[in-house]
Amino acid sequence: MDDQEVTYPVYSPASVIGIFSNALKLNATVNLIYLKGRYAYGGGKSYGNYYYDLLFSEGDHTSIGIRISSLLRSKITNNEVYTLRGFIEKSIKNSSIELRFVVDEIVQQEERSISEEELEKYALIQKKLETGSKDLETLIRDKMLKDEKVRVANIYGNNAIVQKDFFEGLDVSRKYFDISDHSCNITSSTAIISKLNEVSGPDYDIVALVRGGGDRQSMETFNDLTLSELFIKMNMVTVTAIGHTVDETLLDKLADKRFHLPHDYGAGLHAIAEKLSHERSNSRALLIDEVKKDMTKQFSEQVETLEKQLKKKNEEFTEAQKTYKEQGEAHNKTFSDQLKVRNEEFQKLQVTSGKQLEDLHKNFQEQQKQRQAEMESYKKEIASLHEKNVQSAINESTASLKVNLETLKQENIRLSQEVQGSKTDYMKIIITFILALVIGFILAKLV
């Protein structure tokens, strides 16, 4: 008998993905839905008159891709909270199915309130403005005039490959620098803090955070308050080259020098070193003479520039203080209103709770009285039952004793009768015996 040939369906990878993609038919994929979250710009370019951005949840860093037309995108402000209407579309990439929200309408923009975290960030920026930034060019100039190498600590991510970009930008000026590479988990603020503590000290003149880009979610690491506070306390010149040209993190604002890309960082050092190298190539005497001639002018210009900068900073600070005061007053008013509502709710809750407690206490006392009455009733019933049981036992014992007494009386009567009868018989015998003796005696006499 020939074996029957086994038949089974054969699918291609594309067929399997298509089957599962078509199976994902939910209401959210065929109907218009509403999404609310923090809007974040994606790339700076549009594709087919559409932009591809992200919408983050307000409570965490979970995000979904956004596809939005150029017209609607022009009405969006980055990092603001919006309620959007649209639908979910699916796209297949290799063996994964990606969901994307297509925006049909901007429903509402939420008013942004100043959080405690933002106030702390603002305080750090103010602190940095007060202490001032260390000048990178001045540091390199001083080192080159002393024929000393500038000691640099570059902190990269684990398995990073952007060192090549940095050194390409640095080019031939590498000879002026003593560069040490350090690696850590660049997406973890804790790991970066540990590495900064490790390289802090007199061994380095510059410390730089170098990163070649990455997803926007991981950029939140560079907004960490603890990391930022440590960053502005460091004695070295601090540099950032985090790899995002659009976004500016808190560390970028607090750094003494910011570069967009690792290559820009290297090229920036090269430009400074090249400029100072050309200056050194001139005659020292000529340089000294030129410095003497221009000393007063430079000093005056510097003073004037510093005065202008100081005036500008004061104006910015005054404006910032005004803005902060207005925002603080608005925040305090909102907080006072919320506190008033909470106090009213708390007072109502206190009254309700007091009444409930009083009712519970009253019910408890009534239950106690009822239980006391029941206990008294139980005691009386028990006492009555006990008295009845004792009386019953006494009656039973009395009846038994009466019966026994009656029996004893009957028995005594009977015995008395028997004794009386016994006494009569004995007298008869005695009399008979006496008579017999008398008769015998008389007969004896007669004989």
Image (spheres, grey):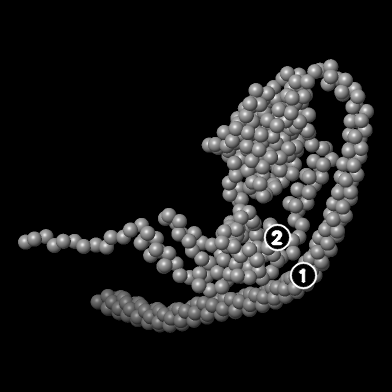
In percent of width and height, residue 363 lies at 69, 76
**Quarter-wise, where is residue 170 in the image?**
top right
Q: Residue at x 46, y 81 (%)?
A: 403
Q: CB under 8 Å between callouts 1 and 2?
A: no
Q: Residue at x 76, y 60 (%)?
A: 113
Which quadrant holds the N terminus? Answer: bottom left
Res 211 visible: yes
- Which residue occupies the foreground of this view, 265 or 106? 265
Q: Residue at x 59, y 62 (%)?
A: 50
Outermost residue, left direction?
1
Which quadrant holds the C terminus? Answer: bottom left
Crowding around mark 1 (Cα neighbors within 10 Å: few <14, some 14 to 19, many 20+) is: few
Label 2 SS: loop
> Which residue is label 2 attached to?
77
**Tag nearer the camera, 1 or 2:** 2
Q: CA distance from mark 1 to mark 2?
A: 37 Å
- Which residue occupies the foreground of this view, 74 or 26? 74
> Which residue is label 1 attached to?
345
Q: Is residue 322 above or below residue 127?
A: below
Label 1 SS: helix
Crowding around mark 2 (Cα neighbors within 10 Å: few <14, some 14 to 19, many 20+) is: some
In percent of width and height, residue 139 lies at 76, 28
Tell me the amino acid under the disc marked 2: Thr
In percent of width and height, residue 339 lies at 80, 64
Q: Residue at x 24, y 62 (%)?
A: 8
